[in-house]
Amino acid sequence: MAPQPVVTGLSPKEGPPGTRVIIRGEFLGNRPQDLVGLKICDSDCLLSAEWKSPNKIIARTGPARGKGDIIVTTVSGGVGTSTVQFRVYHETIGPLKESAVWIEESSPQNFAWGRRTLTQSGLTQEDPLGLSIEGNEQKIPEDLRDLVPDACGDLSQENFSPAWFLLENHSATSFVDLKAGLSYLKRKVESQKEGQLSFLKSNAGSVIDQLDTLMNIRDKLQEDTKLHGSEPLDVLELSIKNSIIESKKIFDDVLVRKEKADSTRAVLFALSRHKFLFCLPNAVDRLAEAGEYDKVVNDYSRAKNLFGKTEIPIFRKVLEEVDQRIMQIRKQLHEKVVKMPQRVEQQKKLIKALTSLEVQQSGTLVGDKLRNIDPAWDAIEARAKYLETTLRHTFEQYANRDAATQDKLKNRDPNQTPSRVNFCEEICDIAASQLPDLWRLGQLYFTGELRGQHDPKPGDFKRMILNAIEKFCVYLRLTILIAADQRTLRQTTGLSWPIGSNTATHQFLSWIPQCLRYTRIAYATLISLDLPSEALDIIQKLIDEVRLFCFSIIFKRATDRCKKLDAQETWEMGVEDFPGATLLPAALEALLVETLDEVQSVCMQPEAREGNLLEPQSDGQREVSQRLQEFLSAFSRVIEELAYQSHDEETPTHNVSQLLGFPNAQHTDPNVSSGHFYATGTSAVTWEQRMLCCLANYAYCNKSFFPHIGELFVKYGYPLPTLAIETSRYTVNQLFTNLLEEYVEHKGDPLVGTIEPSMYLGRFQWDHEMEIGKLRPYAHECCDNLVGVYSEIYTISPALLRPILESIVQTISEELARLMSCVRRFSFTGAIQANVDIRLLRDALENYVNETAKNYFLEALEAINPPLNAEQKRKADEILGHVKHNMRLQLLCFGVKDL
Amino acid sequence: MSKKPTAGPALHKVIMVGSGGVGKSALTLQFMYDEFVEDYEPTKADSYRKKVVLDGEEVQIDILDTAGQEDYAAIRDNYFRSGEGFLCVFSITDDESFQATQEFREQILRVKNDESIPFLLVGNKCDLNDKRKVPLNECQLRAQQWSVPYVETSAKTRENVDKVFFDLMREIRSRKTEDSKATSGRAKDRCKKRRLKCTLL
């Protein structure tokens, strides 16, 4: 047990009752609940006590008197002690003193009839010294009681002590004032001592008044005696008796009236009750008309409670009437419940009203006629049916409108939204607004909120929901997926959207993403409903199909745009790591990126609860692959077209015929062929150059661009479309070979063709002796022509040098071999000359000679007949060295290796 | 008081005087309960009493914490009469409160009619030395004139708090032993003798 509480401090230590005191000490309890008692000067102050800490309590003093201990009692420490004491004093408050308490200044009136107030008590006793007490602190110095025991300062008390009085009331009065007071007191005492005479003198007026009054009383008494005899009391008694009888009469009268009033009130009360019942049939009708079914239910149940078990026939009759009316209302209500369209809340309200009416009416005779109806279920059915009809109706309406407009004007405004899209929007709106309603109603029904006493039919409801969603999907499918095979759908549903003109269908295609968006919005709404996944799967399937359709449409459109890319070809060679390739692939890439972006945002990005279209081995992947392949092959065809396009427009320039005498304008102006190529820009691009560009593009596509496209797809989250890219590369490769052949043929044929005429120009014959020492013109010409071709290719794309030149060289070597073998006989010098010519050509083109060409050259050398002897060989070597020295510029040209 | 048994430990009555807001209550509460009260609430008249050990002897100290405000000047006489020793407190940050100590001293001397009543001049709030308004030498000079000790305290940091109370109690005790020796003492402090009897009885 904790130590006893001890109070050691008080602030303040004195004051009137109600003073707020801060009590300090030790062990004053360890929590507010520990404090169970507080007494200040023996008055209980626990109520006002506010426990602050084990050292501090704040309380207000109670109505005590005098000085006393502060006793704190705690559960833990018991009853405590105090080392300090509190003193309670009472303040008298006069009109001049400040006070926090309202003091009633007028003396209290005694309202007893016919009674005068007695003389006032010594409450406002005058100071015997004639001094104002006010302003003096009226408090007893604490040692007063010790100084004057058994005394008090009250003038009227027996143990009055003047010392006490003075200390109590005049502790602050100055000595001069006290002396004046003493003389005042003395004067007063003196005046009383002077005797009766002086008293009479001073009060002569009032004494005479008293005498007059006494005389009056005597006269009145005599008069009374004269009038009523000597016993006036008899008269008084009589009149009192009379008045008693009279008052009794009045009292009885009042009693009777009160009874009457009571009975009247009871009757009125009963009437008001009955009024309610009698008015009920009409009131119920009126309320039902106003649509306030809650009130109907309320009133009806009230009536049922009040009169349900009544035996009074009139009430029963009225009740029956009410029951009939309620019956009518129920029928009306039921009609209203199944009437569509209306809001779920409204329907809910009606159903609730109907159900409660039915519950209340069950058991009555009338009520049993219309039983076992399930308004909520009816409402659900009605809603489902309404949804179905709305869907169908909307579909028919739009389909018919579309058919009608198509007949009327074929070319509609292309900016106008096709009715398929409008239908899509509307049907999605309908589904998104009505399906949730239906579902909510169903939920309410199955959670029991709207259910009557009937068993729910979950299977039916689920079927209903699934059916509705399926219908919804069918309509959308008919509308959106125009490319798909709808024959089975048409057969099963008997519905079809009128087949429009091609242009209309084409217009609609661009709106499909819009439709997809509508569908998705509706889908999102349905997802949030917690529908069974079975139902959602139906829509998901549709959405996935639409997405795929969307994808293929977008890609088809991209392919169409790709086909028009040729207009964008500027023949500007901008690919850094592949000289000769133009900006066309970049344009294609931009188009592809744009398309992929669109696809991504429109359909590929799966939204909430949608499938991934790119599952391996899925339709989606196949579609992607196929579309890409189409796209790329379209591009290949574009290049092809570009390559062959100018065949008809431009005369091919055969810049190989300088010896034959029709000088070529382009060749004679070297600025155009190569030097000015970049400066003059696209306008001066020749057909050959374009062809070379296309060749370069093909090679570029094959080597790096198509794989790059694949990476692009991967970047967008698609699986690498290897098949499509490989196929496209193969196609491109094929096209490249074809084009190459075309080019080689175009370039090589004239070149090779000039060799023979040039060789035999000027009636030249190999068996004639000739001047030797330099190259024959035909070989020069051939060499120069090759340089021309070489420079042309080199300016466009050095990478193409080898494949082109090799085949040209091969044809040259073949031609030489053929020509040599045709010569029957060589003269001595002729043999040397031929040897030099052939070897020069061979050596010059060393870098581009393949095996076949090498063989042909060898064949050509061997065809020289008779073969060269040692001297001829020496001579030939000498000449060859000389010629090579002369032609070192041309030879240097071919010496440039592939870049 | 007659109810109190005389057998208890000696009781020393200390009165706190000084202007309003100088920290009389703060000093008292710090001495009594080791707590420092931050918020200011003017005192009317508070009473505290507890046992302390003074130089190995158990005594009771009774502290009367008076109102500093001028409104209560009239009732001070009553309180002063019962005091055996006085702590005259002023704030070293407030020159007016220092000047007021003169009046308190005079009033105490008038009431007690005793030049050598136990009395300590206390300069409080010495933790606020940077806001000092009353120079130290002036305080010491005044204490010298009155021939009383001067102590600077801080109710906030408890500096010298115990010292002033114990010093005062020692003075009271020595005065009491002096008085009891000279039993039929000088006529000039009759009043005091009577009071002493009262307490003893």
Image (spheres, helix red, strand yellow):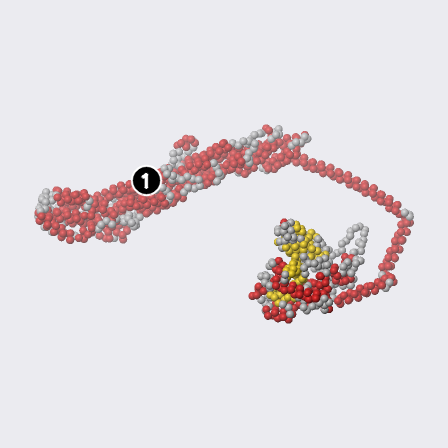
Image position of A519 with respect to A217: above or below: above
Local packing at callout 1 (Cα closer than 10 Å; few below 14, some 14-19, many 20+) is some
**Residue B12 seen by the camera:** yes
Residue B66: image quadrant is: bottom right
Q: Position of residue A866 (x, y in %)?
A: 9, 44
**Residue A338 seen by the camera:** no
Residue carrying label 1: A723
Residue A753: image quadrant is: top left
Image position of A322 with respect to A687: above or below: above
- Report the number of discs: 1
Identified at 66% across, 64% down, the residue is B173
Query: As shown in the figure, which amino acid type bears the numbered disc 1?
Result: Leu
Q: Position of residue A286 (x, y in %)?
A: 61, 36
Q: In the visual, does A419 lie left or right of A586? A: right
Q: In the visual, does A320 lie left or right of A138? A: left
- Nearer to the camera, A181 or A472: A181
Q: Position of residue A287 (x, y in %)?
A: 60, 37
Identified at 25% across, 53% down, the residue is A676
- Nearer to the camera, A3 or A631: A3
Disc 1 element: helix
Image position of A130 with respect to A867: above or below: below
Identified at 46% across, 40% down, the residue is A524
Q: In the visual, does A795 lie left or right of B48? A: left
Q: What's the chain of the residue with tag 1?
A: A
Q: Position of residue A122 (x, y in %)?
A: 78, 57
- Nearer to the camera, A145 or A156: A145
- Nearer to the camera, A704 or A594: A704
Identified at 59% across, 69% down, the residue is B135
Q: In the visual, does A557 lie left or right of A354? A: left
